[in-house]
Image (spheres, helix red, strand yellow):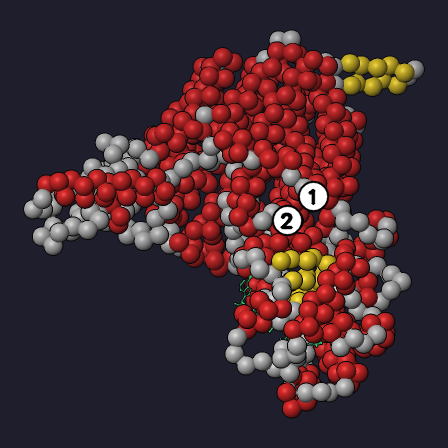
Amino acid sequence: MSRSAPLGAPGEARSVLANKPFRRLWISLSLSSLGDWLSLLALISLATILTQDSAPLVQYFAVSGVVALKLAPPIVLSPLAGLLVDRVDRRLTMVVGHVLRGLLYISIPIVGELWWLLAATFLAEVAALFWAPAKDATVPGLVPKKQLAQAEKVSLLSTYGAAPVAAGLFAVLASVSSLLGGLIPSMGSPEADVALYINGVMFFAAAAVVWGVPVPKREAPASAAPAAPAPAAPPAPQVPFDDPNARTAPIPDPNARTAEIPASGDPIAATVETPVLPDPAELAAEQARAKAAAKAEWQKNRFRPENVLRTLWEGRRYAKAAPLVRGLLLGMLAAFAAGGAVVGVARVLVERLGAGNAGFGVLFCAVSAGMAFGVFAGPRVLRDFSRRRLFGLSIGVSGVALLFAGLIPDVVMAAVLTFVVGAGAGIAWAIGLAILGHEVEDDSRDRAFGFLHAAARVVLLVSAAVGPLVAGVIGDHGFQVGELAYDFFGTAAVLIIAALLTLAVAFVSYRQVAEETEVPLFTELVAALRGVPVATEKDEERLPGTFIVLEGGEGAGKSTQAGQLAVWLRDEGFEVVATREPGSTKLGMRLRALLLDKEHTGMSPRAEALLYAADRADHVGEVILPALRRGAIVISDRYIDSTLAYQGAGRELDSAEIERVNTWATDGLIPHLTVLLDVPPDEGLARLGGSTDRIESESAEFHTRVRKGFRELAERDSGRYLVLDAREPQEQILREIQRRVRPLLPDPVPQDAEAITGMMPIIRD
Ligand SMILES: Nc1ncnc2c1ncn2[C@@H]1O[C@H](COP(=O)(O)OP(=O)(O)OP(=O)(O)O)[C@@H](O)[C@H]1O
Ligand SMILES: Cc1cn([C@H]2C[C@H](O)[C@@H](COP(=O)(O)O)O2)c(=O)[nH]c1=O
């Protein structure tokens, strides 16, 4: 998954939903998502009710079984779906999947037996396995490429937004049924049954809606045509694949991300027609080439449903990644585990607290709404507080809330506290994704996010399924201390254990993720709560921006790298000011002309040093400091070290004096990072070609001294320098610079929280 663009204004969401075929698919998805969440609640609840007269351990096992059977199939069996999705009619797959699920859910309350509840849950999930990839493979054919990211986000929003809605609906159903149960005692509490019937109806409605989606016919990939047919050969037929039932005109799909294989299983058979060629051997060779090319193209483009286990296996190296990435992954997964523990034990917990299904709905609603709140509000909370610190802290807050939810046997408190658990997890998820997006290199970002999503699903499954088992093993206990009676439930013990583990992870990831700073945590927190900047001793420490300088001899590639770096950082969403010395201000331009004009050959070295310092003073005052105060990233092509190397080492002036003059000229502003591009002078000068200016035309000895001067400066202050061999390829140099720059960047918190929801792991659909 790429770091997708934010959903943007609601208008953009509307524009993708204005597309009627996609809107139908989305409505179908929303209905089935709502049904999915509702079924999770109803099934857990029904399993608890069906086992209420059995031993507590049986009840815990039943709940755990439902959770496992509901969440495991998409993880374990996803490769199966991949075998079929490119081979069968997608619309039919979606319709049949929905109808089957509807029938299965309706059958559960009719049969009314635990074994069938578990079996039907599993079968419904197997049916869902095929719907999801069929839907995913259909979207690119319905939506223009530029709206694909929006389509994906709209889908994810309705998938996750459905969770609190379903929980609220379930709580309302439970309240209504207990009200009616009070009036008509023989009625019992049929809310779980009713929820499953409603569920069935929702899936039937989803099937009816998706039946009307005009799943586009596909054209054969262009490369499937014979590569170079003889003039007499007819053009390759554009054989439409897919959907014999299509009732509407095929939608042309210039952006198709997917290619389909015909029913025969041979991607080529339908696309290569025998041209009339004079030489049969040549024709056969031609056809073989075309077939191989088309097959390669199909392989490249064919839709691949997510294979969770493979993604996990391929991404295992992230467990050994740098501490920062490791800390982020660990913390985000712990946040998910905390939420999973609540979901797993909530139903039995509320029963112990005497709240029943309504309480379960409220608790589920609280944790899912808390998570949604955290994800949306997280980036806006404590804007002046370090995101890296907030990451660990919010996991810690989740842990503390979970601890109290376990300790206080009260359903109202449990609802409030589980909301806090969800909110903390949501904030950590949002911040973690934003930081991870900047930490991981562009080319491995997709894999890192894929790994995170896959791991999050497994963690959720394990925590939600194992929680009830542990609760069953611990059992429920009552304590009597004098007059005081305290009921301690197995479910509460699970919450406490989960809380302690979450707190331990919060501590570890805080240490790995939070940057080292002299500002104490409490001071920063108080300042952020009051909305004032943290008071520090030195003025420059207050500058929120980042100052990066590129140095080196003539033709080393400074301007090239400065430009590339600026492009990358702007792409990452930062304000970047790319500048250079001498000559970035009005006065500086005149000074540059004076300094580089060969008319002034023989200028006194001190005058030369002072003119460069004058240019720098103006540059710092007019360009660099204002940008750093705004929080921008300033990239300067040359700075003080150039004077130390050229006028100090090159002209053999006293470097301490040069430093003093320049400290005064710049008010002591030093860069956060200086990248030295080291190149032998003759190679660098050869790159420039053409006419030379006053400094470039200095002697070879002069340039050799300059190079040596730069290298000595870097050795003296190696922590602030990155020295690179400027003879390496430009792309490699840029990668090295990016690697070094990443940790210096300000906290990347996107303004659009939707960008983060778009990165939630797909747990269902
Ligand atoms: N790594 C590299 N390998 C080969 N050529 C490069 C490399 N980097 C830049 N160049 C080429 O070298 C030439 C000089 O590059 P550039 O202008 O970026 O250098 P510079 O250090 O800014 O020069 P100046 O000394 O004028 O400030 C350009 O033609 C550029 O394309
Ligand atoms: C800042 C600074 C520069 N120089 C020299 C180095 C170069 O020859 C020119 C600047 O031109 P560029 O090719 O655009 O980099 O000026 C110097 O001698 N001292 C300095 O402080």
Q: Which type of secondary structure does the marked residue at label 1 adopt?
A: helix
> The disc labelled 1 sits on which kind of residue?
Leu
Q: Mark 1 = which residue? A: 324
- Residue 151 locus on image (x, y percent): 45, 49
Is the CB atom of the residue marked by disc 2 within 8 angstroms of ligand 1's nearest atom?
no
- In the image, residue 388 above or below residue 75: below
Name the residue: 43% across, 51% down: 148
Q: Is residue 628 left or right of residue 206?
A: right
- Residue 262 locus on image (x, y percent): 25, 36
- In the image, residue 602 above or below residue 527: below
Q: Mark 2 = which residue? A: 439
Q: Is residue 257 left or right of residue 544?
A: left
Crowdedness of circle 2 by 10 Å Cα count: few (<14), some, many (20+)? some
- In the image, residue 372 above or below residue 176: below
Q: Earlier in the sequence, mark 1 or mark 2?
A: 1
Marks 1 and 2 sit apart, C-alpha to C-alpha, by 8 Å
Say which mark, if any, is on residue 752. Answer: none
